[in-house]
Image (cartoon, grey):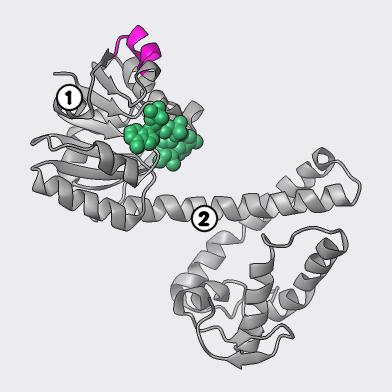
Amino acid sequence: MSDVAVLGLGAMGSALAGALLDGGHAVTVWNRTVDRAAPLVARGASAVATAADALRAAPVAVVCLTNDAAVREILAGAPGTTLVNLTNSTPEQDRNLADWAAGQQMTYLGGGIMAVPPMIGTPAASVFYSGDADALERHRGLLERFGRVDYVGADPGRAAVLDLALLTAMYGMFGGFLHAAALIRAGGLPVVGVEPAITAWLTAMAGALPEMAAAIDSGDHSETTSAVRMQALAYPHLLEASRESGLRTALVEPMGDLLSRAVAAGHGDADLSVLADLLRDGRVPSMDSDGEETSDEQPT
Ligand SMILES: NC(=O)c1ccc[n+]([C@@H]2O[C@H](COP(=O)([O-])OP(=O)(O)OC[C@H]3O[C@@H](n4cnc5c(N)ncnc54)[C@H](OP(=O)(O)O)[C@@H]3O)[C@@H](O)[C@H]2O)c1
């Protein structure tokens, strides 16, 4: 028996297996495309021919494939094995897989990796885990090889909730940056010259997040110096400037739309944090292209 098996040796799986080898563990590896195991075998890993062999080769198996469909294709029952699924998944996919694992007498931990491959094994990496708490404690020493272990609860889908929430925030930031970069280029400037100002601005604005989080949890959005009404009036300028420059506005239109809907729904004096409530409850009115309210149906 090895200490641990790693199934899936793409960019992330290879980094995970490498961190385990660096930690002195006996590692069994499996990958659909056999050649990808070679660099890890050269570092001391044992390669096996099938996913089923890998799942039986160690008390804990770390799976890191493209998506849930791929995981479903390769999984085989291995009673007694703890399955640690670090594949990006939805909460429901993790819960279904945990049910499947329980039916195979396997224990299950869902995970969400908050790192890119070069960060694995460094203090900058962290991984959310949820599911079987005893299994997590049994294998904590191994899992700490990847980065900080953040156990977030018994619901096997909880790690995916947090993983996807953090990714959502990240894509919002990258989406904003990419549109800003296109606007800067259209204005005849190099992006590198403006990037430091963007980074400084985003860092300053991130300082508002603790207060916004508290407002969203409490439902009290009354404290603000930048009311929704003011923002709804200013926002169209960035859309207009983008259209004047011939840019696609797909990345930035939804926020403007939601601001207008929030004003129409009577939240003009509220803080921007109120938009989270409106998204959650579907309480925003539908509007026509002139900004006139047409119905109170949930927007699509
Ligand atoms: N890379 C990142 O920055 C990063 C960060 C956080 C989380 N993640 C997550 O980590 C997971 C893996 O990402 P990655 O970067 O390692 O991707 P990747 O480099 O594209 O590797 C994908 C892996 O999945 C395997 N695979 C895909 N379809 C398969 C199938 N039908 N049957 C068997 N194996 C299959 C591939 O095998 P072959 O080699 O045979 O194609 C390969 O081992 C994803 O869920 C990703 O969202 C990645």
Decide whether the magenta segment is chiefly helix, strand or loop: helix
Tell which of 59 and 199 is nearer to you.
59
In x, y percent, where is residue 179? 73, 54
Q: Tell me, for residue 100, which label it has, or none.
A: none
Give the residue drawn at x 17%, y 39%: 135
- Chain part drawn in magenta: 37-45
Q: Is residue 43 magenta?
A: yes
SS for dot 1: helix
In x, y percent, where is residue 269? 66, 84
Write down the residue under mark 1. Answer: 53
Residue 162 seen in the current view? yes
Q: Is residue 179 magenta?
A: no
In x, y percent, where is residue 166? 48, 52
Measured Cα–Cα span from mark 1 to mark 2: 36 Å
Write down the residue under mark 2. Answer: 168
Tell which of 290 and 195 is nearer to you.
290
Give the residue drawn at x 87%, y 64%: 244
Quadrant in the picture for residue 6? top left
Mark 1 packing: few (<14 Cα in 10 Å), some, or many (20+)? some
Among numbered discs 1 and 2, the one appearing first in the sequence: 1
Residue 42 in the image: above or below residue 182: above
Give the residue drawn at x 84%, y 59%: 246
Quadrant in the picture for residue 45? top left
